[in-house]
Image (cartoon, rainbow, N blue to C red):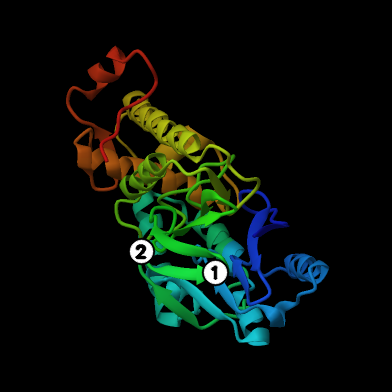
Amino acid sequence: MERISLSNSAFEGDNNAYLFADGSETVLIDTGDWMETTREQLEAALSDRGLAFDDIDRIFLTHWHHDHCGLAGEIQAESGAAVYAHAADAALIEGDEDAWDAMHDRQKRYFDEWGMPEERQEVLLERMTDGETTVETPTVTAFEDGATFPVGDAELEVVHTPGHAAGLTMYEATVDGERVVFSGDTLLPVYTPNVGGADVRVDRPLEKYLRALRGIVEADYDRAWPGHRDPIDDPADRAQHIIDHHEERSWRVLDALDRKGPCDTWTVSADLFGDLEGIHILHGPGESYAHLEHLEREGTVVRDGSEYRLADGVADDLAATDEERWDLEY
């Protein structure tokens, strides 16, 4: 197995594609985005190994976001490669119009519910739809959690980890004697993957993501190969760090409500993240919503229409805490 680093200036740092090429078949996990620079980089990396797009036999995708599946359709058109993804994301990856219309309708409902100003919505929608009409889409073979696929001397086992995306998938395997996981955007070495905004189809996004992280802690993998940046040598420690981060963020959400009084998601987001640009216009209120929704179900906050306020007694509990962290149930 070899990691191929591909440029990506818009999201969480350089993307990774993972190449399995044992002479009998050639397999990729993720492809990077659809941009010309990325295509050239992937072609050059394959060429250095005596390969080309038309040599690819199978592609396993971690989720539907364009920076992970952007070249899957083009590679499939050249090679006839089978493209695999979780059933929850298959229709979006295939470019199904009904699936995308439903996504956009749901996004619009949430943007209004969050209190996102119309002018910010226009900027965001233009940013999000860039490339949707130009990406060549593949035909996808859908799988479910627990599916296994032999790849050379290894076997990939699907671990469904919704939160950042409805169909977000990790692949467990034993590679060179190590028990590893190809973690996509479930576990990243620098950033914490956005929950709540990155895929508005996910119900209870923070709860599901925290459970996925707890699964990584319990699995205690030797190494994680993430969708962006460098490998993670202690995945359990990194997963626990992100759990801690979300408990600290929940404290900040509650502190914002304590200081500001009842307010909507957009206001909480502005308090947490300030003025946002580009795709972060989505990620800030999306993450704030994920926390507010979770805290509402726990009974820590109360929702009235589009506004949230602290439940009775929570302000006193906040004042009594010794650290800026709120224990979450999941």
Q: How many marks?
A: 2
Q: Separation of disc 2 and disc 1 at Cα?
A: 15 Å
The percent position of residue 108, horizontal first and vertical second, equals 40, 63
Q: Amino acid at mark 1?
A: Val
Residue 19 seen by the camera: yes
What is the quadrant of residue 18 in the picture? bottom right
Q: Residue at x 37, y 48 (%)?
A: 212
- In the image, residue 234 sits, relative to residue 321, either above or below, namely below
The percent position of residue 308, horizontal first and vertical second, equals 28, 39
Seen from the viewer's position, the closer of residues 177 and 218 is 177
On-image quarter of the N terminus: bottom right
What is the quadrant of residue 256 in the picture? top left
Seen from the viewer's position, the closer of residues 266 and 171 is 171
**Apparent side of residue 17 relative to residue 286 in the rendered image (left or right):** right
Q: Secondary structure at mark 1?
A: strand
Q: Secondary structure at mark 2?
A: loop
Q: Amino acid at mark 2?
A: Gly
Please tell me the numbered disc located at residue 174: none
Residue 33 seen by the camera: no
Please tell me the numbered disc located at residue 146: 2
The residue singled out by tag 1 in the image is 151
- In the image, residue 309 sits, relative to residue 212, either above or below, namely above
Q: Residue at x 54, y 69 (%)?
A: 151
**Apparent side of residue 152 relative to residue 117 in the rendered image (left or right):** right
The percent position of residue 321, horizontal first and vertical second, equals 31, 15
Mark 2, other Cα within 10 Å: few <14 / some 14–19 / many ≥20: few
